[in-house]
Amino acid sequence: MNEHHLETSKSICLTGYGGFDKIQVQNVMLPPALGTNEVKVQNKLFGVNFADLYTLKGLFEFPLPHTLGLESVGRVLEVGAGVKDVKAGDRVVCYKWTGGLYSEFINIDMKNCFVIPPSISDEDAATLPANYLTAYITLFKIAKLQADQSVLIHSCAGGVGWAATQLAKLFSNVTILGTASESKFKMVVENGVNRPLTYENYATIISQSEGEVDCIIDSIGGSNFSISQKLLKPLGHAVLTGCSSLITGPEIFTSSEREALSSSTVPDMQGLVMGSRSISGFHLGLLMDQNPQLIRNSMESIFKLLGDGKIKPRIDSIWSFHEVVQAISLLEKRKNIGKVLLKI
Amino acid sequence: MNEHHLETSKSICLTGYGGFDKIQVQNVMLPPALGTNEVKVQNKLFGVNFADLYTLKGLFEFPLPHTLGLESVGRVLEVGAGVKDVKAGDRVVCYKWTGGLYSEFINIDMKNCFVIPPSISDEDAATLPANYLTAYITLFKIAKLQADQSVLIHSCAGGVGWAATQLAKLFSNVTILGTASESKFKMVVENGVNRPLTYENYATIISQSEGEVDCIIDSIGGSNFSISQKLLKPLGHAVLTGCSSLITGPEIFTSSEREALSSSTVPDMQGLVMGSRSISGFHLGLLMDQNPQLIRNSMESIFKLLGDGKIKPRIDSIWSFHEVVQAISLLEKRKNIGKVLLKI
C-alpha cells in the first residue's frame, strides 16, 4: 500500500456552502495509513442522496473542502488488522452519513461496509443502503407493519419511498397509499402503490374516503409530519425518516432553517394520547454507529430479498463524475423516479 | 324493569371540585330505560383509580353532582335488544373512563362490559381493566417488548406498574427496572422487578450502570416522560400511560395545570431522530370506543393468563362505600401497593 500514500484520489469536493458552483471535481491526497478496523476500497459507482443537498446548502458544517457522498460500490484493496468478514478482492457497498465517499479511493470503517453477494450487480447494490435500509428498518423494526394494515408512504417515487413500497408489498393484503407528483402516478402504481395521492390533497382524501392509516413513512418532515400524524388510526405509528421539505430552492440554509428539523416537527403529545398513537424519529447513519449488528443483519435480509427477486431497485439514471451537478439537480427538482447514480 | 325506574341507586357522588369533603354517598335516581346496546348491572365491587383524583381535582369537568368510578364488578340484571355475548345472570367487569360506576345499579354500553370466566374471583376481576389492560396493550401491542430486552416501569408498585411487571416477566430473559419509594422495594422485587430504583436516582443510575433500556412504561408523565426518553436505547420505545405527577397535594387544578398533560411532556423530536427512538401516548378509555374488538381480545388474553396462573393481581385493601375517602386517599398519598377496592 505504500505506493498509494503518495497518490491522489479523484473526488467530488464541496469548496463552500450554497449553489452548485461550489461543487468541484478535484484530486485530493489519499488518506494516511489504514486504521485497524478500516477497509481500503476502490470505488466505481455512487448513490446520490438528498443528504448531498443538505450538506451543499449548509445544514451540516464540515471543514472545507469536504468530499461529498454517502454511498459507494467498489472493490476492496486492503483491510486493517482487525477487520473480519471483509477481505481484499471483495465487492462492497459502503454507507457513511458524514460523507467522503464520492472518491475513487476511500478508507472506511468496516461497520460501514457490506460484502455484495455474487448474484447482485454493482448497480443494484448501489441503490440499497440509504433507501432500502431506511425503508426496511422503519417498516420491519420500528413501525412493525402487519398483514391487512394500511401504510401511507410520502414521496413514494423518491428513493426511500420506492423501496418502502416494494417492502410493504411483502406483507399480505397491505393497502399502500402514497404521495407523489401527478406526473409520476403511473410509475408508482406500477411499483405497487394502491392509491396515489398528491401532496396537496392527500390529507383531505384520506380523512374523507380512506378513513385513517396504520402506518406512515415520512421523508418530507416539517409540517407534513404534524399533519400526517392526525391521519393515524388508534395504535398507528408514524416514522420521520428525512426532511426533504427543507430543500425548497437554490438558497443556502439560514440558521432558523437549520433548526427546522426539530422546531417545525413538534409532535402533538395530546393527539398521541387521545389516539393511542406512536411516532418515531430515524437516523440511519447514527444507528450504524449505535447498533452495527442490527444494520448488518438488516442488510443481509435485503440482499436475500433482492437475490430472491422479491424487491427490484429502479435506477433513474447513471451520470459521470463530471456530471455530478446534473445528477444532484434531479433530486433538487424532484425529477427522478428511483435512484440516481454516479460512476467514475 | 319498570319497577326500577322509580327506585334509586346508592352512589358515590362528587358535589363540587376540590377536597375530599366534596365526595358524598347519595341515593341517585336510576337511569331511564335501557338502551339497545346497554347492559344493566348490579355492582358489588369497584376499582379505585388515579382518575378519581383527576376528576375530584377538576382535570375533567362533568355536570355536578357527578357519580365517580371507572371500574366495577357485578351481575347482569337485563340486557338491551342489541346486546350479544352478555346475558342476564352473567358476572361482568366494567370500565368506563368518563365515570359513573361507583353506583349499585348502572346502565352501561356492552363494549364497556366483559363477562368474567367462572374460575376468576370478583376481587381479582375488579383489578383487571384499568391496570392489566393498560399494561397488556402498551407492552404487547404498542412498545412490543421482546425477549432479552429491558424495560423501565415507573411507579412499579402502583396499579399499572404492578400489572406491567407481571406481564413483562412473561417474556423470556427480560430485565425489569422499576421506580418506587424505597419502602416498597422489597414488595416490588418479590413481584418480579430486577432492579428497584428511586424516583430521585433512577436516571443517573440507569445512564451510569445499566446503560439504556429498550422500553419504558410511564404513568407519571410531565417532565418525567421527557427525562425518561433520553434513557432509551436506539430503536427503544417509551409509552405515556398516565399523569400521576399532576397530583401533588390537596389542591384543585389550575387551568395551567390542566394543560400540563400536553405542555409539560413535549417530546424532543431531535432526540427521537438522533436515537431512532419511538414514543407513544395511550388512552384506554378512548381506545375502548375506537377499537372495542382489540380491547375485548386483550381482555380475553388477560382472563386466560389469570386463569392459567401466569399473572396474580395484588389487592392492597378493600373498603366499604362509606370509607371511599380513606380508599382514594391511599392513592393520593402513594400508600398502596397494588389495587385498592371498594365494596357495597
Image (cartoon, coloured by chain):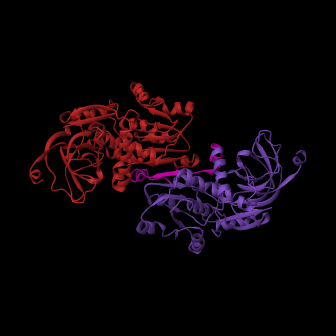
Chain colours: A red, B purple
Give the side of residue B271 with respect to residue A326, left or right: right
Image coordinates for residue A168, horizontal then vertical, percent: 46, 38
Q: Quadrant of the C terminus of chain A?
A: top left
Residue A236 versus residue A250 in the image, above or below: below
Is B39 positioned to the left or the right of A325 in the image? right
Residue B290 sits inside the magenta stretch: yes
Please say whether residue A107 is one of the residues in the magenta stretch. no
Instruction: Report the span colored magenta.
Output: B264-291
Looking at the image, residue B258 sits to the left or right of residue A261; the answer is right
- Image coords of residue A290 (percent x, y): 36, 56
How far across and how far down the image is residue B245, in percent? Answer: 57, 61
Q: Position of residue B222 (x, y in %)?
A: 53, 58
Q: Is residue A49 visible?
A: yes
Residue at (65%, 55%) from the top-left corner?
B302
Q: Can residue A68 be spotted in the picture?
A: no
For the residue pair A342 and B2, the one nearer the viewer reads as A342
Foreground residue among B156 and A84: A84
Q: Front-most of A298 and A278? A: A298
Instruction: Report whether B284 appears left or right of B29.
Output: left
